[in-house]
Every structure is written in C-alpha cells, then in structure tokens.
Amino acid sequence: MKCNDFLKELTDYLDGTANADVRVELEEHLQWCRDCYVVMNTTKKTIEIYRDNQVYELPETLRSKLHQAIMTKCRHSKPGNKSTE
Amino acid sequence: METIQKKAAEDTSELALVQSAKKGDLEAFSQLVKRYDRNIFRIAQHITHNEDDAQDVVQEAFLKAYQNLEQFQGNSKFYTWLVRIAVNEALMKLRRRRTDRTVSIDEDVETDEGTMPREVADWGPNPEQLYGQSELGDILKKTIQGLPPGFRTVFVLRDVEGLSTEETAEMLDLSIPAVKSRLLRARLQLRERLSKYFKSKKDGNGQP
C-alpha cells in the first residue's frame, strides 16, 4: 500500500467503516510509515477537537427571543399557507 | 436495548408532534422548535459565519418548515428534512453576501488543494490545553471559515452534528461518494491548518 492509497481510505478507517481486509492493510502501512501515522493521528484529533469544543452555542436569551419570533410568525401563517403577509 | 426502545419512543412522539402541528397545533410545533433550534443555529453559523444571518436562517427555516409541513411525508426524519431547508436558507444568505461569485454545495470540488498533506509534525497529547477556551474557540472558528462552503457544510453535518454519511447525502442532494470525498478533503484541510497551532514544539519545524 502506498501513502496515496492510505489517504483514500482514511475517512472510512477513521469512521470504522473500512472493511476488514483493507483495515489490515492500513494498519500494516501505519506500522512503518510515520508520516501517515501522524496524518491519521492528527486528523483524528481534528475531528475530536471540533466535536468536543462546540463553537457557536446558542445563548439562552437569544434562544428565547428567536423562539418567540418564530412562534409569532407561525401564528400568523397557517401550515400549508405560504403567503405569510 | 433500552437505547433502541428510547429511540423508537422518541421517533414516535416526534411523528405525533409533526402530525399535530400539521393540524395547526402550535404547541406541538413549538416543541419541535425547542428540540432542534440549537442544532439549526450551529449549522447556520458554520455556513454563514455571521450571527445576524444565522438568526435569520433559524427563523426562516422553522417558518418554512411550518408552512410546508404538508409536504413532509414522513419518509425521512423530520430533522433531516428541517436541516435540508436550513442549509438551503444558509447558502442563500451566503450568496447574497458574496456578490462576486455564486456559492453552491458543489463549489471547489475539483480542486486538489489540501488533499496531499504537507505538514507531518505530530501534535502534543492535549493540544487544546495549549490555549484558553475562548482563544481555542476563535482558532476553531477561524480555521473552519477558511474551507469552501461545500466542504465545511459536510464536515459540520458529519463530524460536528454526528449525522451519518447517508443522512448527509440526503440532506445535501449529494451522492455518497461525493459526501465521502468532501469529508476527506475537509478533514485533511482542517488538520493541515490546525497543525500550525497544535504541533508539538519538539517535533515541529519551528513556531507558528
């Protein structure tokens, strides 16, 4: 397996959806290719960092303001009725 | 097993809420809004990178969903259907702000930029701890903003919101290989850019 082939399979490998044969080959490649090991490891961390540190949380005050606005708009528009105004 | 049962119960109650809302029960719709408003806001922020736009997207997406509830057949999950509406609204906002060029989910798919890793310095064991929470948040926002909209949308749905490849493909009207290809590129480009901040000093080729 070459590094290029490794990269192609990286997403399935990280998601745990690569099939067993491919997985064995990938793991063998990781044994001796330090660059691919680093790429795999840091890509995994990239995903974890974005998953664990949610940016753009909706603050509660803004949340209730938005909720009120949505419900007011809905109240003036029956479901199925596209002309709101 | 318990989780499966819980999930099934949630799906049933969600369908019941949708049915009631279709008949004009606003309280039922209000519960659907409360269930998903945080997710929709986050997705909208990631796509538009503008808080005013994201607020508009949240309002417009829920209003459109309410107005078009009749068209929701229940073949897919309500959330999948809702996100599809929100993504379209968000892309429209983005298009309006960027008058110089059109924005679509297919944008920049031909480029190979960032697919081939250039930075191969490893990161320290707890890279996030190098920065304070708000500084880290700024780094993550700035980094994801640099991705083409089509890439970051796929990344946000798959890796931040935790949706499946199939669900993401359905929401964005993309094929499964297209979602996988965009996800790989998004992940690799983010990794490359974050390396500047997180690479271990002893391993790296200098300071950021």
Image (cartoon, coloured by chain):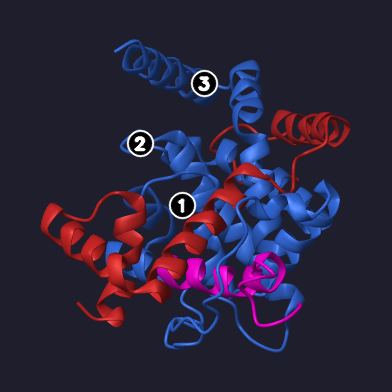
Q: Could you say which is closer to the camera, residue B63 or residue B12?
A: B12
List x then y, in percent, for residue B140: 71, 60
Chain letter matching colour blue = B
Q: Are marks 3 and 1 on the same chain?
A: yes
The N terminus of chain B lies in quadrant: top left
Mark 2 crowdedness (10 Å alpha carbons): few <14, some 14-19, many ≥20: few
Which picture quadrant has residue B198? bottom right
The extreme right residue here reads: A61
List x then y, in percent, for residue B148: 58, 76
The C terminus of chain B lies in quadrant: bottom right
Give the label on residue A39, or none: none
Chain that bears disc 2 = B
List x then y, in percent, for residue B101: 65, 87
Mark 3 vs mark 1, CA separation in Å:
33 Å
Colour in which chain A is shown?
A: red
* Relative to A14, residue B32 above or below: above
Chain that bears disc 3 = B
Is residue B197 located in the magenta-colored stretch of the structure?
yes
Query: In percent of the image, x 35 and y 33: which residue is there?
Result: B74
Q: Which residue is mark 3?
A: B23
Mark 1 crowdedness (10 Å alpha carbons): few <14, some 14-19, many ≥20: many
Q: Is residue B36 left or right of residue B167?
A: right
